[in-house]
Image: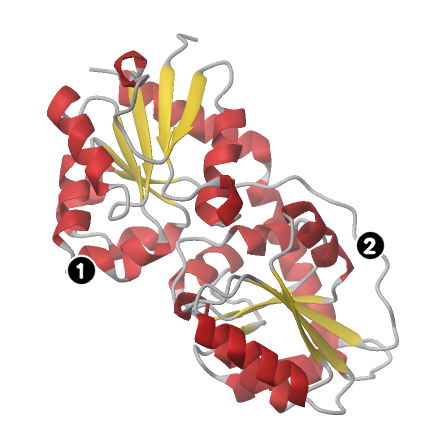
Amino acid sequence: MQKHRVVIVSPARADANNGNWQTARRWQKLLAPHDARIVLQWPDAEAAQDELMLALHAKRSAASIEAWHQRHGPQGLGVVLTGTDLYRDIAHDAQAQRSLALARSLVVLQPLGLRTLPASHQAKARVMVQSTPTRQTLPKTQRHLRALMVGHLRDEKDPLTLMRAARLLAGSGVLIDHIGAPLAPELGQAALDTQAQCPHYRWLGARPHEQTRQRIQRAHLLVHTSVMEGGAHVLMEAMCSGTPVLASRIDGNVGLLGEDYAGLFEVGDAQGLAKLLRACRAQDHDNALMRQLARQCALRAPLFEPQAEQAALHRWVQDLWIP
């Protein structure tokens, strides 16, 4: 294998602890033996040595993509499309649209993302599913059902749907933990208000990634209420920890969970989410819905093995290098 100098452009720093940063850091490791580094913006003092660019986010990395193209043309230029790229920005934002045009190759993180791309760009796009290590399922209490949502408090994650569902679940035996930083202050206030009025809802704020993963392992369910996603890594972390998922019916979730997944609810449907949570809590001798969700997630989990993502990432790098 020919080794290359790869620069990964991430619009997020490590302290953001979000999906972009987690992807950049994981790819830096998976790209070995290539020499990969992560930058917020390109060019920088080390730019002259870079041979390939992998840019996360068509809009937010647009300046770096433009600078690379001015210096190298499309050679070695790959762009990864996030949820806000696919399901908002490329439809009307000139910077995002130009990033698509300049890139030699495009990546989407789940198969349904391809159908959102303009037809003129689909030939240079590929699907590259992210990965996460498998973890042991940790013991789960039988006294109640613990649901966990992991997502910073911002409009794209739609945390208000979770909070509205929590208000419908008083006395149900369903406890809800919510991890995420208050990126929108008004949503942080809404979380505090919900916590004060609903003792079964706890907003835990931002937590370190390792602690979050352990909480995923101990939860009965992961809840994901997003209105747009490129392919949420937290869904994979849950499925690869033996924790079933309840998720909004959007392409970014359905592309990972499958069209026939039994734990989907409509976007913004707090009553539908509450109904699913009640059904999962039902004190049946053998809860059929929980068994179905666990079985479906277990069947999907092998798709997210690190070896598969590493192989796909190395193929992408080699294809970007070929003149």
Looking at the picture, tell me which residue is in the foreground, 115 or 306. Answer: 306
Looking at the picture, tell me which residue is in the foreground, 256 or 86. Answer: 86
First in sequence, mark 1 or 2: give its number.
1
Horizontal and vertical percent position of residue 252: 42, 59
Q: Is residue 15 left or right of residue 46?
A: right
Label 2 secondary element:
loop
Quadrant (top left, top right, bottom left, bottom right) of the C terminus: top left
The residue where tag 1 is placed is 91
Residue 313 falls in which quadrant of the image? Answer: top left
As drawn, 312 above or below 247:
above
The residue sitting at 82% across, 54% down in the picture is 138
The residue sitting at 66% across, 49% down in the picture is 240
For badge 2, the amino acid type reads Leu
Q: Are marks 1 and 2 in contact (CB under 8 Å)?
A: no
The residue where tag 2 is placed is 138
What colour scheme was applied to this rendering of the protein? secondary structure
